[in-house]
Amino acid sequence: MWAGAGLAVGAAIVLYTIVLYPVFLALGRRRTAPPVRKDMGFRATVSVVLVVHDGEGFIVAKLESLLALRYPAELLDILVVSDGSTDGTDGSVESFASRGVRLLRLPRGGKAAAINAGLEHSSGEIVFFTDVRQPLDPDALAHLVANFADPSVGAVTGKLLILGADSTGVQRDMGAYWRYELWARQRHSEIDSVFSVTGCIYAMRRSLASPLPTDALTDDAVISQRVFFRGFRVVFDPKAIAFDYPMAGTTEFRRRLRTLAGLWQVCVRMPELFTGANRMRLDFLSHKFSRLALPWALLLAFASTLALNASPFRDLLLIAAAFLGVLALVDGLVPRKFPLKRVTSPARTFLAMNAAALLSVVVFFVQPATLWRTTRMKGRN
């Protein structure tokens, strides 16, 4: 009896998360917030906070990208916070001093601590956070700032485009997932607010900023939720664009592990996410928390299937599960252009993403800082 109930519960969670909620989000007729009163003529002073650790390979190009932004230079203050860099990062930043770029050196303390220090040294009405790796579209900042003409907006995030991704394989699968995520953010922004911003391209009102927990793994999620619970909207603007390159496979897995571990932190530290105080509670449970629950639902469904009495139905479910596992395992042996790759790669990506979600509970047993690793770009390291 319990086996059948467990299978039904696990299968229902999986089906709702993967199929039903996206359909509901696309077709459901729901209350939407008024359109953001965006004004491209709106201007405010902006402090750019760029936290970097050993970013010598990217820092010059990133600073050139920031200096090329089409935004009044007299309203822009660029601060680079070097989080214990040991390579040539600091020297490269100092070479831009004559162009108005400031450098703040810190001992290694992690990104959250570096952001806190950057906020202390920022005075702009708007704080624009970005990362060292991703160049920006010249109009990105102007689009972000234009949203703050609407007093209901407390934070805004832009669109990250992945350049040079493979047409097959893991990068294609992650690209499809990211396109779905961008679409969901657009829809959530229309309803009210997004749940987290993209770490390399987001801005917030300086008056809403407060120090982060120094062990926070996802500053973007913590900051956006704090803004949201103060009654402001956190919106997505697809015209504010940053660019990135595909990550190496193992780096993508570690990044997802860290992101989901950070989501566990947010859930534990902000219980109001699960109460009526959350204006977007249904969507949070369906789109964010479900990512943490999905691998456990899969395990529940599998364990319940094993516990069922022998029957053709049970055998069919076990064969399907085994087939999915085999497809994922052989993916590394399938040539990139071989047609079978279109089946094996999604299977491998699906299992890898859920494995990362399953392992993300490690955040409760280790120091969060151990989950940070240097990002490796595909074909660039």
Image: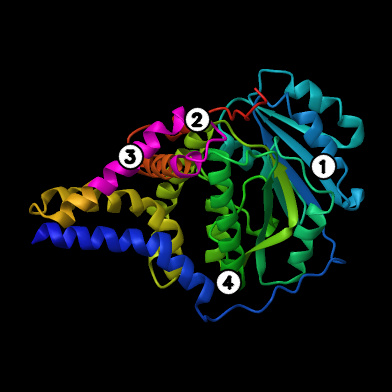
Question: What mark, if any, has residue 325 been given in the picture?
Answer: 3
**Please, what is the three-letter code of the amino acid marked with disc 4?**
Asp
Comes first in the chain, label 3 or label 4 = 4
Comes first in the chain, label 2 or label 3 = 2
**302 or 97: nearer the viewer:** 302
Q: Residue at x 82, y 59 (%)?
A: 44
Q: Is residue 190 left or right of residue 222?
A: right
Residue 267 location in percent, x, y? 40, 54
Question: What mark, if any, has residue 66 been given in the picture?
Answer: 1
Comes first in the chain, label 4 or label 2 = 4
**Please, what is the three-letter code of the amino acid marked with disc 1?**
Leu
| Label 3 crowd (10 A; few <14 / some 14-19 / many >=20) | some
Q: Is residue 105 left or right of residue 305?
A: right
Q: Residue at x 38, y 39 (%)?
A: 327
Element under label 1? Answer: helix
Question: What mark, if any, has residue 250 been given in the picture?
Answer: 2
Quadrant holding the N terminus: bottom left
**Please, what is the three-letter code of the amino acid marked with disc 3?**
Gly
Q: Residue at x 63, y 37 (%)?
A: 246
Asked whether the beta carbons under mark 1 and mark 3 sit within 8 Å of each other, the answer is: no
Write down the residue under mark 4. Answer: 192
Look at the image and say whether residue 342 sits in the magenta stretch.
yes
Does 200 appear above or below 207?
above
Element under label 2? Answer: helix
Give the Cα separation between the discs numbered 1 and 4. 30 Å
**Please, what is the three-letter code of the amino acid marked with disc 2?**
Thr
Comes first in the chain, label 1 or label 4 = 1
Q: Is residue 274 in view from this perspective? A: yes
**101 or 186: nearer the viewer:** 186
**Range covered by the magenta-colored residues:** 319-344
